[in-house]
Image: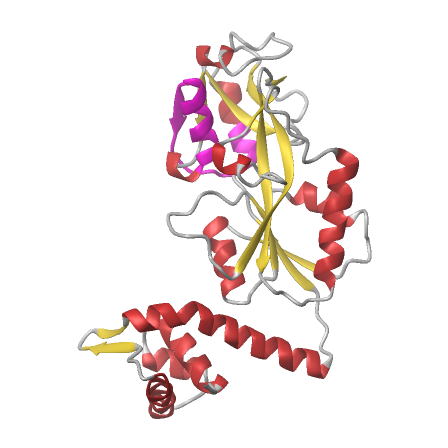
Amino acid sequence: MDLDLGQVRAFVVTADRLHFGQAAAELYLTQQALSKRVARLEDALGRKLFDRTGHGVELTDAGRRFLDPARELVRAGEAAVAAARHEERPLRVSVWGHMFLPLRTVREVVARDPDLDIELSLRPGFPAALAGLRDGEIDFALGRAHVLDEPWPAGVTRRLVRLEPVKAVMSTAAALAGATALSPEELRAARLWFPAPRAKVEFLRAFTERFDVPGEFGGINLGLDPFLAHLADHPELFSLLCGDVEVPGGSGLSEIPVAGPAPLYAWHAIWRTGEQHAVLPRLLAAFAAAAAAESWLDYDPDRHWLPEADQAALPGA
């Protein structure tokens, strides 16, 4: 059947707002015109998409099933118009990450192709990055894609792009601070701390559970400097950071490699499946070149540890 893109867009915006008045204002329509578009779409589909209640509007089961494909249809229409008009804009790239942002990875990749036309932004977390892709606000994102409480979105592609060794960071006054290397079992003598709820730092949670390391989670992540200062003031604590994160000299902290096995922190790239932006293939090629040159995807089960979800994302798994 033929679908009217204007009607589909009216449905998507209304589904996002769950308010006909707000959706009409966003689309520069009268509320009556918006209601007519949605009603015509419902007639064409033979299904009711919204339940109007005295307190507002809610999606029906059919509306919930239709929403993700409808978003893809609207995006495809926008891409078709842009292609016909030869519109060019930067690839919108975003990053997120509790381990103090993978911007350094983006810098290393872009250095291999300095003419990449990209526009960078930050996202507060993985759900926000997925929402940005869904809403067309960004085209590509880099961070740690953790296990979802629902099936992986059909319209989003995920690729493992880097496995980064982590190090233990602790006060120079800590009992373990003089070690040249520490195994996960040896770290049981201290307490792993990170200023975020346990549910939001699943890599650290998995590490503490796998190796029976005491953990202390909670509070607010205010950035790297306050994080390091807290560790320097509390010798009973340690934390894990990606190996490339710089700890300033004179900070009262020791950095100690973790091995036997060495935990690896996985960075993932995500983008809309079928994304047609001309810069995307070049960016992915630059990631692949960096991974090959820097051994970013090297994994040996006898020497390394990865959470099970990350093992499933390994090339060839």
Can you tell which quarter of the image residue 288 is in? top right
Can you tell which quarter of the image residue 216 is in? top left
Q: Is residue 16 visible?
A: no
Q: Against 184, is 222 above or below? A: below
Residue 182: % across, % down:
57, 13
> What residue is at 70 percent from the left and 70 percent from the top?
89
> What residue is at 49 percent from the left and 49 percent from the top?
126
> What residue is at 39 percent from the left and 79 percent from the top?
11
Residue 299: % across, % down:
64, 29
- Quadrant of the image containing the N terminus: bottom left
Magenta-colored span:
201-228
Q: In this rendering, would 1 be left or right of 18?
A: right
Q: Against 75, is 25 above or below? A: below
- Colour scheme of the picture: secondary structure
Q: Against 310, is 119 above or below? A: below
Residue 310 magenta: no
Q: Nearer the viewer, residue 63 or 188?
A: 63
> What residue is at 44 percent from the left and 43 percent from the top?
147
Can you tell which quarter of the image residue 250 is in? top right
Q: Is residue 24 visible?
A: yes
Q: In this rendering, would 128 be left or right of 42?
A: right
Residue 77: % across, % down:
57, 79
Residue 219 magenta: yes
